[in-house]
Image (cartoon, rainbow, N blue to C red):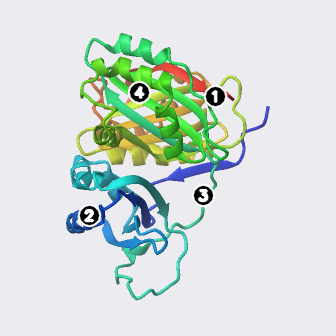
């Protein structure tokens, strides 16, 4: 068995500037409608906290292709905006104009100094200090809620689906799909090698997956119509639960590794603070050879915070570190940011154990994608 060693990580919390690139392929004859919608959108985005600038470009080879780049003071304000209901409504006028889109997000690592367009405020131009070491895996999750009382039926449906083929194309492969439930909330986490959008599209086209989606439709709290492109786009926008932080030790996992997902019910407006706290704690945990934490991925959208964690010991063997609050002061800080549901202020071992048990999500299925 290969020993876990080199540290890999990704994070939205390094404080550096963010560059967002949006590639668009327009419908035939939609250029003028698109430009009008873009001008209206620009005036709205300009007032969003953290936004610095944006730029619209048109291909000199194919005039139906456009490129929008925007710059943000850091990733958190962008994520807060792009995952908001305001954003869903802002971009809706663009849907009828666009045939296909692709969004890319980058921390600014290096740049030519003293560009004329630079602001005098250095806080807006912080660069990522050091490049992070990746593991070639893209992590993403979707979340939605089902009607109260339908949880067991939905779990049965989700557990019974046939895994789609792993290989999407020569460069993209599904690696793993894990489904959890916490009450009536479903979390579907996927790991992809290659292009996430291609992988999601590949999965959505599989008959066995479509059958499962149709089977759970009657149980959803918020109806959806996946056969309608606009309805499907809005659903997946609202359901997106992006990975804002991942850290771990590279290499093969021990055979006795246990995967858990923990749900942190953040108080109103505290979701980002909870995610930051967990991210800092997990950075320290993977550098500690005595820690049970092998890998951790924090997913966050608004006040929905889920932490998927791979442990080398059972969850209750080291409750504080499994919860992501190692140290006497961190648990009470978390206790002030989340609704503990009567489990106290997380200031005692007993309160931590009780909250951990409540946060532990129900595992529905965890399976690597088949090789063919």
Q: Does residue 39 sit above or below 301 in this rendering? A: below
Q: Does residue 104 sit above or below 196 in this rendering? A: below
Badge nearest the viewer, 1 or 4? 1
- How much space separates mark 4 and mark 3, taking CA atoms? 32 Å
Q: Residue 323, how many percent across, how many down? A: 46, 32
- How much space separates mark 1 and mark 3, taking CA atoms? 24 Å
Badge nearest the viewer, 1 or 2? 2
Badge nearest the viewer, 4 or 2? 2
Label 4 close to label 3 by CB (< 8 Å): no
- How much space separates mark 1 and mark 2, taking CA atoms? 41 Å
Which quadrant does the N terminus fall into? top right
Q: Is residue 108 visible?
A: yes
Which label number is shown at residue 132?
3
The 10 Å Cα crowd at callout 3, few under 14, some 14 to 19, many 20 or more, is: few
Which label number is shown at residue 352?
4
Which label number is shown at residue 253?
none
Element under label 3?
Answer: loop
Please give the name of the residue rendered at 40% of the width and 59% of the height, measured from the top-left corner. 24
Instruction: Write down the residue under mark 2.
Output: 49
Element under label 1?
Answer: loop
Earlier-in-chain disc, 1 versus 3: 3
Q: Does residue 160 sit above or below 278 in this rendering? A: above
Quarter where residue 72 is shown: bottom left
Earlier-in-chain disc, 4 versus 3: 3
Judge by depth and name the residue closer to the eye, 79 or 190: 190
Instruction: Write down the residue under mark 1.
Output: 312
Label 1 close to label 4 by CB (< 8 Å): no
- How much space separates mark 3 and mark 2, taking CA atoms? 27 Å
Q: Residue 86, how many percent across, how many down? A: 21, 51
Badge nearest the viewer, 1 or 3? 3
Earlier-in-chain disc, 1 versus 4: 1
- How much space separates mark 4 and mark 2, taking CA atoms? 36 Å
């Amino acid at each position: 068995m290969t020993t876990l060693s080199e540290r890999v990580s990704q994070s939205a919390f390094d404080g550096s500037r963010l560059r967002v690139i949006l590639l668009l392929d327009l419908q035939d004859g939609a250029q003028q409608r698109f430009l009008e919608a873009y001008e209206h959108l620009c005036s709205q985005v300009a007032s969003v906290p953290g936004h610095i600038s944006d730029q619209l470009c048109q291909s000199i080879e194919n005039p139906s292709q456009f490129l929008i780049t925007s710059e943000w003071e850091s990733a958190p304000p962008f994520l807060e905006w792009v995952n908001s209901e305001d954003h869903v409504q802002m971009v809706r006028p663009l849907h009828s104009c666009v045939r296909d889109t692709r969004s890319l997000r980058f921390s600014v690592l290096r740049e030519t100094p003293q560009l004329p367009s630079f602001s005098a405020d250095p806080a807006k131009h912080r660069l990522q200090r050091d490049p992070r070491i990746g593991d070639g895996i893209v992590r993403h999750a979707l979340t939605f809620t089902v009607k109260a009382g339908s949880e067991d039926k939905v779990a049965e449906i989700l557990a019974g689906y046939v895994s789609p083929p792993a290989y999407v194309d020569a460069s993209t492969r599904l690696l793993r799909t894990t489904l959890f439930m916490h009450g009536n909330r479903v979390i579907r986490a996927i790991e992809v090698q290659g292009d996430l959008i291609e992988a999601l599209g590949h999965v959505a086209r599989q008959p066995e997956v479509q059958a499962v989606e149709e089977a759970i439709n009657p149980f959803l709290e918020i109806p959806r119509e996946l056969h309608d492109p606009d309805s499907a786009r809005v659903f997946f926008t609202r359901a997106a639960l992006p990975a804002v932080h991942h850290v771990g030790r590279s290499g093969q996992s021990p055979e006795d590794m246990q995967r858990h997902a923990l749900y942190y019910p953040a108080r109103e407006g505290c979701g980002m603070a909870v995610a930051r706290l967990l991210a800092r704690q997990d950075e320290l945990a993977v550098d500690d050879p005595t820690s049970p934490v092998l890998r951790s991925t924090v997913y966050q959208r608004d006040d929905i915070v889920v932490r998927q964690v791979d442990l080398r010991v059972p969850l209750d063997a080291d409750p504080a570190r499994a919860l992501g609050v190692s140290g006497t002061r961190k648990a009470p800080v978390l206790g002030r940011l989340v609704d503990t549901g009567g489990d106290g202020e997380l200031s005692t071992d007993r309160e931590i154990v009780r909250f951990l048990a409540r946060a532990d999500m129900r595992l529905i299925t965890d399976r690597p994608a088949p090789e063919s």
